[in-house]
Image (tube, helix red, strand yellow):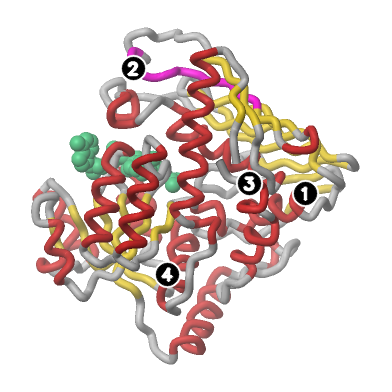
Amino acid sequence: MTTSSSFSRRNFLAGLGASALALPATGFANSFDNDQYLAQLAAQKRELFGQDRKLGIALVGLGSYATNQLAPGLQQTQYCRLAGIVTGTPAKAEQWMQKYNIPKQNVYDYKTFDRIADNRDIDVVYVVLPNSMHAEYVIRAAQAGKHVICEKPLAIMPKECQDMIDACKKANRQLAVGYRLHYEPFTREVMRLGQEKVFGKVKFVEASDGFRIGDPTQWRLKKAMAGGGPLMDVGIYAIQGARYVTGLEPVSVTAQFGPKTDLQKFKEVEETLFWQFQFPGGVVSNSTTSYAAGVERLYASCENGWFELSPAFGYGPLKGRTSKGPIEQPIVHHQANHMDNICKVLLNNETLPDHITGQEGLRDVRLMQAIYQAAETGRRIDLKA
Ligand code: NAD
């Protein structure tokens, strides 16, 4: 397990703060001008690189997230562009080539994927497949000599995460995780409020994320593909929230499964799960994740006040307030912002900050497995550093 220093305020905020894509400071959401912001980014990029080169990204898996969030986001990015696709469905390939002007030589299927090694148009492979497929495609992308962004959860088991990290290291490529909120201004503000103890020390966090799931046949309900139920899908945001608001790593966890109200739908995975983290210094967090009902909240009670985001984890706009009044921040496109912040670092041949790397993805996968172990055994599980 990690120690608190691996998720320290210094590391986390320093990584964010080092960004040349510096977002406006707090408190002027009303005056925020998105066009001006994008123009400022373009100017910063020209200043940094003296040209308009963008990294070419290939999306692997053209499902809902790639189609509805990442591809539209890539129409707004300054440091990267949609250059290629990997899909098993020829009809989708045709549609995407036309819609996004993607040349045929940048289109792959799952069998021809490894040939991407020879394609100089593609710098970064973004893996947006079901969870159980992340490890294989990240490792193949690294072996093809590409940097990789991988969606959350990084993988299902810690061993796979480690293999992915090792493969990227061996290929001298960088591995980023799809934690889009790490560059989202409301989220950054609650990180600051908690980690800088603006309302005193955080004493207690409530972090929950859930929604009512539809289609009973989808891979999210199949244990082999998803690795678990809502914990693997959206509960991971609640884990992140408790960690980034406190800036601490949990030392132990207790957990309980909720009832299954639809035995057919939830034959393989949990329907609802509750857990409690204990952090150093007596700080505690309490979380719920569920596929039965909606919840999306991050609340921190501090020595001298409180702050919260609700909604806290979706595509936004997020909304927040504190015991002193509303939180005002600019509204950005989460995915464009996330990819730009990563690609700016890669373009500049710098090392990604720890909080957005495979190591960070691995920390959460370890925690999720510990939560399952706690719920299954009914015991408090100690988390070793
Ligand atoms: P989806 O089901 O909509 O898309 C999955 C894609 O994988 C489809 O194009 C499908 O054709 C393809 N695929 C290839 N082989 C497959 C197989 N054997 N079985 C099923 N599908 C196969 O899923 P999604 O919602 O796009 O999620 C993809 C990944 O993105 C997941 O890891 C998910 O956790 C992550 N995600 C992240 C966010 C975020 O906000 N960061 C949001 C949604 C999803």
Q: CA distance from mark 3 to mark 2?
A: 33 Å
Mark 1 and mark 4 in contact? Answer it, CB < 8 Å.
no
Q: Amino acid at mark 3?
A: Thr
Quadrant in which residue 203 is drawn: top right
- N-term-proximal mark, 3 vs 2: 3
- N-term-proximal mark, 4 vs 3: 3
Identify the secondary structure beneath mark 3. loop
**Is 1 situated left or right of 98 in this image?**
right
Q: Which residue is mark 1?
A: 326
**Label placed on residue 343:** 4
The residue nearer to you, when weighing 251 against 277, is 251
What residue lies at 9% left-to-right and 51% top-to-bottom? 111
Q: Amino acid at mark 2?
A: Glu
Q: CA distance from mark 4 to mark 3?
A: 28 Å
Residue 105 in picture, x, y percent from top left? 11, 68
Q: CA distance from mark 3 to mark 1?
A: 33 Å
Q: CA distance from mark 1 to mark 2?
A: 42 Å
Q: CA distance from mark 1 to mark 4?
A: 32 Å
Quadrant in which residue 206 is drawn: top right
Q: Amino acid at mark 1?
A: Pro
